Amino acid sequence: MDVTSLQTSGRTGAPAGRRPAPPRPGHRGRRSPAASVGLHTALVVASLIAVFPVFWVLVTSFKPDSRAIEASPSLVNGSSLDNYARILAGEKGDFLAWFGNSLLIAGLTTVLAVMLAASTGYAVSRFTFPGGRGLLFFFLVVQMFPFAVLIVPLYNLLLSLGLQGSAGGLVLVYCTTAVPFCTYMLKGYFDGIPREIDEAGRMDGLSPFGVFWRLMLPLARPGLAVTGFYAFITAWGEVAFASAFLSAADESKTLAVGLQVFVQQNRTEWGHLAAASILVAIPAAVVFYLVQRFLVSGLAAGSVKG
Amino acid sequence: MVATTTGPATEPHRPPPAGTRRRGRLRRFLDRYWYAYALVLPVVVVVGGLVVLPLAQGVFFTFTDINEGNIANPVLGREADYDVVGLANYLNVLSGDPAYGSFWAVLLRTLVWSGICVACHYGIGLGLALLLNRPLRFRTLYRILLILPWAVPAFVSAFAWRYLFNADYGLINWLLGSVGLPTPVWLGQSPVAMVAVIIVNVWLGVPFMMVALLGGLQSIPGDLYEAAEIDGATPWQRFTQITLPGLRPVSSTVILLGVIWTFNMFPVIYLITGQNPHTRILITYAFERFFSGATRDYAIASTYGVLILSVLLVFAGVYLRALRSREAD
């Protein structure tokens, strides 16, 4: 992404959707009505496919378990808020405690991963130093290895660090999966910020860290938002590590682990599972909605210059 | 994206004068680089510690016969009791023996799975990005709706799709049946299950590609299109001569990442079809060895991990070399 488009899209933080689209093939007003209908039809169909599975879970979440399995599907069938009430009241396990744990772990992961990725991305973008390129290649390799296979060595390591069974250990493990991709993206983002800004900051007497903290981080906000979203999503729904590295006590589980109770014993409680799924998806959707206007510019900068 | 471009140095490299004392050299080295290293240090400690050490131990496991029965158990206070077996694990796995997961057949399935998924991700993502990258009403709304699958936690999507694919009371078979089409058992023990998981994974992966490509499209200067139009280029020519070359940097990155992620896409398959041999890819088999069975076979699971890493390293090397030689042309 070149400097000018960064300034218009990234720097001001204007909602990308409200920006007038650049003139492209099919200028405004030149599109025939038939082409317009075709365009909107294609987008409506694609949007329906994208949304429908989640919508159907929402519909199911209001049905009692017995009615969730029906020969001919219906939107409403004995629907009520009972499933939600029962889950929130803790009849199916300590839902609110799980929720709090998940929020804490995903929140800490987001903050820590973004901080680590931002400082590394900045260093790799601005300074040439021995090992810098090797570090980037190492991050690519890290994504190639199926880390869940390493649960045993990781378990032993956390045990010897005294972090086994605690939220802190899990946060560190999540950071190792989120940081490599986040670093790539933020490096690309910093590459798009002109060097003159660094130099001007140094002239004004800022230390290298001051430049990073006071100038670069605010300018890279869209990139930070996208990496934060990625880190949050990585940690929020993860099951394998969470079930291995948290203690088995009910009140220390995360949502993703706790919800497995609904699918056990060959008898899936579809209605409750659906309601719980919606409750899990809500915070992710909120985070998504907050950052979605940054997604296009943030992700593009990361991949173009990465 | 791998180390193809590194920003120019803030300070030019000066060759150190010959005959400098070692301490002086170290000092100048630190003077020049210390804040770069200070910025990188936290990541090196956290990622390095939590990746390199377990990875080294995991690679060591591949040369042993370790499993849950003979591993050291600090909780029970049991000493380790496994033997080093040399290359036996690799030989067993690479022989393609069904007892060790029929490696070659599963590798082939993994390649087919990755190829189909990434091709669909890219094709559909590019199509949607092109549609969204023009002035149109409700653009923001469409974009939000289309990105939604990315924001939903994987196990929630997996549940949603398992419910939709259910053979007896799922919505998909109800729809197919009501228009008179056959209603397969989607998630049963047949190759149809593979079709089902590919559909789900395509659904999951398109938003990322679409968003990245949309950003790439927006960074192509608009005057290129105007100039082409004046020269009388057809829409198809504009697409192949301007759009595709302009997207190349984004495309090469997202395709490489897409292949790596899809190759190791464990949750979708595992949560939707479980231990179904018809949907088995390398990483789900590693998990089967790891998590199930009377003795959890850590050695074979780690061997699969190392083999997955090797396959992907070879792929990345060939891919990056091809990119570079194309750039040089």
Image (cartoon, rainbow, N blue to C red):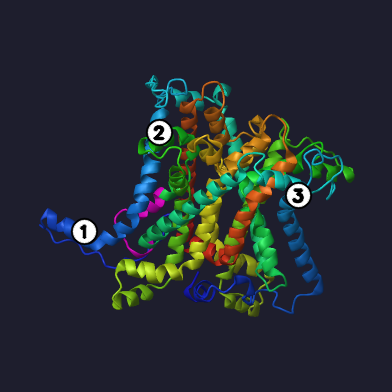
- Compared to residue B127, the image places residue A180 above or below, namely above
Residue B308 visible: no
The residue lying toward the viewer, choosing from B247 and B229, is B247
Q: Residues within 10 Å of mark 3 (few under 14, many from 20)?
A: few
Protein chain holding label 1: B
For the residue marked with disc 3, what is the amino acid?
Leu
**Label 2 element class:** helix
Tell me if label 3 and label 1 are in contact, CB under 8 Å. Answer: no
Residue annotated with mark 3: A81
Protein chain holding label 2: A
Predominant secondary structure in magenta?
A: helix
Residue B29 numbered tag: 1
Residue A201 location (% of width, % of height): 34, 75
Q: Is residue A87 left or right of residue B50?
A: right
In the image, what residue occupies the spot 64% across and 51% down?
Answer: A281
**Label 3 element class:** loop
Residue annotated with mark 2: A156
